[in-house]
């Protein structure tokens, strides 16, 4: 099968690249809007916001399946430039879905209001209250309109050893500051992008294609404060003495969301119910603390 993976320079796209070597029965085409100097594979330059370009690429390379890891993910900037976010998160998704290929598309917990108190199921009412959430929801809707057989995977709190993310930011701040305030009233589940990538390959290689919307994060629940505490605790056991002491000396404080100057409101509750994906595809999902350990070992050993 010929598989196109868009957004290959991002966290998930890079994890897909790493895992693809374990599934050599497929041919892979990795694409993004630019080629980075650090790219370890050939990157096809493809602007997915241009329908003609997408159609030409799919036809030329006889693509069977598209995994869309590309997205406009800057939540605050999306408020100022919703038009650009809509082009990437919705219109481009429509073009990918219109190619006739199978599609696996990555979406987000931001399609919900974030005011829930129990884990969200796939068919729960959507009510995005940010530009980012609105554009991602529009992408889901446009995709299913043109390709009802598509698979949509909603995820949350994504991090990886690749790219910029919360784990890397906390490690840097912990080594630079004497104290650090992290919100404790936003609840969710960290998701290691490598585990999401593994789930995607599980779906690709499943004996049957089960179209629909699914939720995937790691198992368990925590606040951003809890997540940071775990990052610091585990990192200290992996770092050299000097680096570990810097993080150990950083005083971690729990703060309210109201104390942090967000440009755009963040969901207070982002926990997703994963029963459907586990039952449909028989996927086993690691707990977020175990996944974090794997990521930190990779990140801090490099």
Image (cartoon, rainbow, N blue to C red):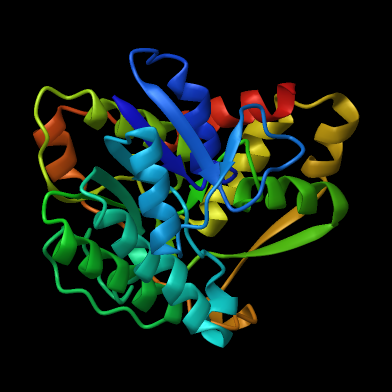
Q: Is residue 268 above or below residue 233?
A: below
Where residue 1 sits, quadrant-wise, is top left
Left or right: 48 as drawn, with respect to 145: right
Q: How many marks overall? A: 0
The residue at the point 49 percent across, 41 percent down is: 12
Q: Is residue 261 above or below residue 124?
A: below
Tell me if I can see residue 287 in this picture.
no
Left or right: 242 as drawn, with respect to 302: right
Of residues 68 and 291, the one nearer the viewer is 68
Left or right: 19 as drawn, with respect to 300: left
Where residue 24 sits, quadrant-wise, is top left
At which x and y percent is residue 144?
Answer: 17, 61
The residue at the point 70 percent across, 52 percent down is: 169
Tell me if I can see residue 280 in this picture.
yes
Of residues 149 and 234, the one nearer the viewer is 149
Of residues 119 and 109, the one nearer the viewer is 109
At which x and y percent is residue 184?
Answer: 51, 64
The residue at the point 15 percent across, 43 percent down is: 275
Q: Is residue 144 above or below residue 170?
A: below
Quadrant the C terminus occupies: top right
Left or right: 212 as drawn, with respect to 261: left
At which x and y percent is residue 216?
Answer: 29, 45
At which x and y percent is residue 192?
Answer: 47, 38
- Residue pushed farthest bottom? 80
């Amino acid at each position: 099968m010929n598989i196109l993976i868009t957004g290959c320079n991002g966290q998930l796209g890079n994890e897909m690249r790493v895992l693809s070597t374990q599934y050599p029965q497929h041919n892979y085409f990795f694409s993004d809007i630019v080629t980075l100097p650090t790219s370890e594979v050939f990157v096809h330059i493809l602007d997915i916001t241009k329908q003609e370009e997408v159609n030409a690429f799919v036809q030329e390379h006889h693509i069977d399946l598209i995994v869309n890891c590309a997205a406009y993910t800057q939540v605050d900037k999306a408020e100022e430039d919703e038009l650009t976010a809509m082009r990437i998160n919705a219109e481009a998704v429509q073009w990918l879905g219109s190619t006739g290929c199978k599609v696996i598309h990555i979406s987000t917990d931001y399609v919900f209001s974030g005011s829930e108190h129990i884990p969200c199921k796939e068919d729960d009412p959507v009510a995005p209250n940010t530009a980012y959430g609105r554009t991602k929801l529009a992408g889901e809707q446009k995709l299913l309109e043109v390709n009802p057989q598509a698979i949509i995977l909603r995820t949350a709190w994504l991090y990886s050893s690749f790219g910029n993310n919360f784990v890397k930011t906390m490690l840097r701040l912990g080594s630079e500051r004497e104290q650090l305030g992290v919100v404790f009233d936003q609840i969710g589940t960290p998701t290691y992008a490598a585990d999401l990538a593994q789930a995607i390959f599980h779906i690709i290689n499943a004996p049957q294609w089960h179209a629909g919307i699914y939720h995937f994060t790691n198992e368990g629940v925590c606040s951003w404060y809890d997540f940071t505490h775990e990052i610091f605790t585990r990192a200290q056991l992996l770092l050299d003495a000097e680096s570990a002491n810097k993080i150990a000396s950083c005083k971690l404080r729990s703060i309210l969301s109201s104390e942090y100057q967000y440009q755009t409101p963040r969901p207070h509750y982002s926990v997703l119910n994963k029963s459907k994906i586990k039952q449909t595809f028989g996927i086993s999902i690691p707990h977020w603390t175990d996944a974090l350990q794997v990521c930190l070992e990779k990140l801090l050993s490099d």
